[in-house]
Image (tube, rainbow, N blue to C red):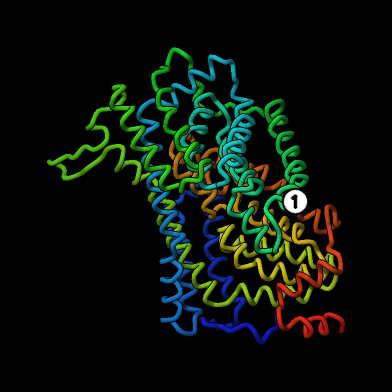
Amino acid sequence: MSEKTVSKNLEFYGGTPVLLVPFSVMFIGILWLGLNGTALPEAFWPMVLLGLFVGLLLAKNKKDFVDALIQGISSNMLAIMLLAWFLAGVMAKLLSTTGLIEGLVWGFLGLGVTAAWFPLITFLASALMSVSTGTAVGTLIGASPILFPVGYSLGADPLLLVGAIIGGSFVGDNLAPISDTTIVSAYSQGTKVDRVVKTRIKYVVVAGIFTVALYIGFALFFNRGLGIANTPEDLKAAGLLMLVVPVLLMYMMIKGQHLVTALLYSIFAGLVVALLAGLIRLSDILLVNKEQFSASGIVIDGINGMLGVAVFTVFLMGMIGTLQKGDFIEWLMVKSEKFATTPRRAEITIVFTSLVVNALTTAGTPSMVMLGPFVRRLGHKFKISPERRGNLLDACSTTIIGFLPYSVAVLIPFAFVGGMVENAAGINFSPVGVVPYVFYCWALMLVIIYAAFTGWGSDTITDEQYFRESEEIYGNNLKEEIAVSNE
């Protein structure tokens, strides 16, 4: 790629790097909220709007800026995310209303499970679910409204619980053969899914060992009992009937059903079971108050509970649209290629370019789709194997978005449980406060950075494989590319 290939559709005063200014404004605002213990998803709205306004002022053509913003908001990915979140809000409200959480707490107390060890159980359960389903978002939606309330009711540290759910959700997103990021990381680099999975196990194992060790250390030496700590006498087991909802959800996702499809079936099955068992009445599903001209109930309250993260994400996707329309990604690729003059530097370039792009978009799969051709071309130049390239790309796309406070992956759990913690401000229970506690995402990111700098796990292709891949990448321009590489 050369400088000439970059065409700017949306221009800013000061050049392409100025596109980072709106994101910086938003991030500083969110960080300020976090330091004050007020980093709620709803409080993020003014910060992202301020960033968009700054971007509008810096744009040379205001109409182009607004068009790019609208284009970002109108993406199919956003529509699917919003639909899934609203349905997930309904499911979470159904489960809390019918007493599933109380039933599970009753069961764990009966088994003698203590609060100190529940974050580790939460991480392992979330990891198992994500490996089985291949989706981080689906795991966050399925696990957050169940595992967190149970652990918190037992008395576990809420920050450790949220971090465990998020970290466990990304284990499968990175490792599962059916994960969209795993598939993209393989095919974007011209290799097969089974090959990238086999070669990335060593990175996951090392990160997993560090993560489990941290949870064990916290359980033994830093046990903070901050939850409700119910006693068995306060609880009832009847709500355990509602296990049909998460079990059906997980089963359908394992079978390859779309998350929205699985949510719809699970919600309606849960409503039927709850009504037949007498756990809810029809008025619990929908209650209209004629005198006050208002409505409430499981469906309405569940959807309202997701509005904070939904509205923020709409604005954030608009900001990302301006980033894409301004050709920032292409500009970043061009600049980063100048540093990549050796195999080690090429791998470092792949890692840090991927981390930056994911930090800006907070969307793993779309970022990988955008970066895939660049990573393949750059890695091929230095004969880095397709599997190694895919592993570097995937690890970066399933780690940093797990702890950024404005990332959807962080905001989803807080949309479910944000108002549940007593004295939340006192322990900074917020998207900013949880950043250090997503142990697995931090561990895997540091492992892959170490691998890039040291060459641990690096693999190369033969001359025959190199020329065969050259034909795939460059086609009729192969001779010209070889001549350029030999200069």
Q: Is residue 159 visible?
A: no
Q: Can you say whether 279 is above or below 128 in the image? A: above
Can the viewer see residue 371 in this picture? yes
Name which residue lies at 69% across and 77% down: 334
Residue appearing at x 61%, y 61% in the figure? 358
Q: Residue 34's spot in the image, x, y percent?
A: 54, 50
Q: Residue furthest left?
A: 291
Name the secondary structure under disc 1. Answer: helix
Residue 20: where, in percent of width, then height?
Answer: 59, 70
Quick check: 304 left or right of 479? Answer: left
Q: Nearer the viewer, residue 376 or 427?
A: 376
Q: Foreground residue, 192 or 413?
A: 192
Q: Quadrant of the N terminus?
A: bottom right
Name the foreground residue: 462 vs 341. Answer: 462
Residue 478 x/y as whole percent: 76, 81
Q: How many marks?
A: 1
Identify which residue is drawn at 84% across, 58% down.
459
> Type of residue at label 1?
Leu
Mark 1, residue position: 446
Q: Is residue 63 left or right of residue 370?
A: left
Compared across the picture, whether 286 is left or right of 442 comes to left
**Where does residue 285 sit, x and y in percent of width and height?**
27, 35
